[in-house]
Image (cartoon, helix red, strand yellow):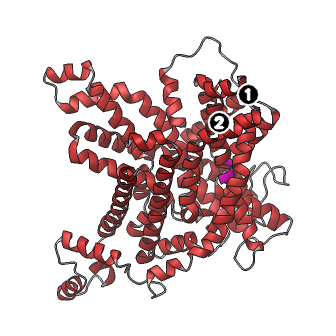
Amino acid sequence: MAWFALARFARAMITILVVVGFAFIVLRLSGDPALEILSNDAPPEARDAFRSAFGLDQPIWVQFFDYMTRIAAGNLGNSMREGRNALAVVIERIPITLALSVPAFLINVVIGIPAGILAALHRNSLLDRGVMLGAVAGFTIPTFVLGLLLVLVFSVQLGWLPSGGARSWHHAILPVLTLGAGGAAVLARYTRSAMLEVLGQPYIRTAHVKGVPWRLVVYRHALPNAAIPMVTIIGFMLGQLIAGAVLVESVFAWPGVGRLLVASVVSRDLPVVQCVLFLIAVTMVTSNLLVDLLYGLLDPRIRRGGQA
Amino acid sequence: MLQQSTSEALTSKPTSTRPRTPLLVHMALAYLAVFVTTAAVAQFIIPYDPAAIDLKARLSPPIGWGGSLAHPFGTDELGRDMLSRLVLSIQMSVSIGLGATGLGAMVGTSLGFIAAHLRGWIEQAILALIDFQATMPFLILALAVLAFIGNSLAVFVCLLALHGWERYARIARSLAISANAQGYASAVRQLGAHPLHVYWRHILPNVAATLIVSMTISFPEIILVESGLSFLGLGVQPPSTSLGAMVGYGRDYLARAPWVLMMPSLVISLMALSVSLIGDWLRDRFDGTLR
C-alpha cells in the first residue's frame, strides 16, 4: 500500500509540474513583455534595462528556475487590476464559491445516488424511465442555458427570487439548483449503470437464490461492488468544487473564483489567472489522488496489483 | 464509457434478434441531420442578410407570440432577423466543431503514434501530457490560454482542438502498439518501408474505425465548450455569431424579449440531447451484458 500511495503521489506531483510548465510556456508565447509594457517606440536601451530588471535576458532555463522558486514561495506577483497580492485576491473568493458548490455537491449526492439505485432496482419500470429522462435532460442542457431558464421562470415571470448578486441566501437558491441539477443527473446515470452491471453478476444471483433477503443482497453485495465507479465520479465532482462553477457564477453574477477568472481573462490580469489555474490544478490533482487511494482501500486487487 | 462501448459496437456483429429502433432515436437522428444540413446550406436558405438592421421592426416577437410571417423567429434589439442569425450561428458552431475535431484528431493521433513508435522517455513525456490534459477541466485551460494569447478565430479553433486530443493519443498509442506486434506491420517493415509509410498506409486504416467513433463523441462536446466560451464573450467575436454568442447576447433582453435567448438555447440543448439519446441507444443495442 505504501508503494502504491507513493507512486500515485509522484504522478500527482508530475501533473502539477506540467501545469506550471504549461503556464510558463504559454506566458512566454504571449509575446515580449518588454514590448507589451513599454511602448513600441521606447528606446532599445530602455527595453534592455527592462529585460535585465525582470531577468528576461537570462537563458530560458534560468528564467524557468526563477519562476519555479517564486511559485514555490507562493509569490505569484500582484494583481494588475487591484494592485494587491494575486494569491490574496484569489483566496478571498474561495469561500464565496464554496458557498455555492458545497450545497450543490450535497444535492448531487443526496438526489443522484438514491435516484440511480432506485432506477437500477426497478429496471424498465415507469420510475426508471422517468428518472433516466430527467437525468438525460439534466445533463444535456448546458448549465448556462438551464440557469437562464430558471431566471426566466422564477425571477422574470414569477418574481419569487433574485436573478443575480450575492447579498442574501435567497440569491444562492437558483445558482445552487442549477449546479445541483446537472451533477445529480450525471451521478444518477453513473450509479444506475454501475448498479446494473453489478446486479447482473453471478454472485448476486447466487446470494439471491440461496435465500438472502433481497434488501440484504442489495446493501451487502451489490452496493459495495458498485462503489468504485461511483467513487470515481464523486471524486471528480469534489475536484470540480472550485472549477465547476465558472459558467453558473457568470450567469448569476456570483462573485466567486469563476467570475474572478472570467473577469481577469477579459482584462488580461495574468497573475490572477495563473493563481486560479494553479489553485484548480492543485484541487483536481488532490481529489484524483484521494480517489486513487480510496480505490486501493476499497478494492484489494488494485493495491496489490500496483499498476492498475 | 460511451466511447468504449461504441467502439465495441463497430467491431461486434449485431445479434440476429433486432429490436425495433425507438421513435425517440429516429427523432434524434432526424434532428441531427437537419442540424448539419442547415449548416451546409446556410447561405442559400437565410431569408435576410443577418447583419441587416431594421430599427422599425426591433424586438418583434416570433410566430405564436403575436409575430408575423415576415420574421418567423422574431427580431433582436437592432431588428436583425433571428432566423437568419440562428442559421448562420449553427453554421459557425458546426464549422468550428468540425475544424477543431479534425485538427484535434490529427494532433492526438500523431502524438499517439509517435509515443508508440519511439517509446522511451518521449513516450513518458507524452503520457504525462495526457495525464495533465485529463486532469485539468478544459474550460479552465481554455480561459487561461485566451487570457495569455488573446483571441482570434484561428486561435480559438486551435484551442478547441486541444479538447479531446488526449483521447485520440491514448487510443492511437495502444492500438499502434498492438498493431506493431501483428504480422502485417512487421511484414511491411521488413520489406523496407519507411515508418511513416507503415503508420499512414497500414496502421492508420486499421485503427480508423475506433478513432472515428471517438471523433463523433468529441464533436458535440466541442460545440458545447464553444457555446460556453462564446456565451462568456470570450469565444466567437462580433460581428460573427455562434449559438453560444447568441445566448449571451439574448441574456440582456431576458425580460423584454426572451425569444432572442430561447431559440439558440433550444437548438444547443436539442443537439446535445439527440447525441446523448443516440449514444445510449447504441450502447444498449450492442452491449449484450446490459440487455
The stretch drawn in magenta includes residue A184 = yes
Around disc 2, counting alpha carbons within 10 Å, would you say few (fewer than 14), some (14 to 19), or many (20 or more)? some
Chain identifier of the residue bearing label 2 in the image: A
The stretch drawn in magenta includes residue B79 = no
* Residue B180 image position (x, y, % from top left): 26, 27
Badge 2 is on which residue? Answer: A221
Tags 2 and 1 both on a single chain: no
Lateral position of residue A228 relative to residue A152, left or right: left
The answer, for residue B9, to whether it is visible in the render is yes
Q: Which sits in the foreground, A45 or B287?
A: B287
The answer to whether mark 2 and mark 1 are in CB contact below 8 A is no
* Residue B233 image position (x, y, % from top left): 55, 65
* Residue B235 image position (x, y, % from top left): 51, 60
Q: Amino acid at mark 1?
A: Leu
Lateral position of residue B76 relative to residue A197, left or right: right
At horizontal 22% and vertical 48% (from top left) the residue drawn is B121
Chain identifier of the residue bearing label 1 in the image: B
Question: What range is drawn magenta here?
Answer: A181-185
Does B245 appear above or below A54? above
Q: Please tell me the numbered disc located at residue B23.
A: 1
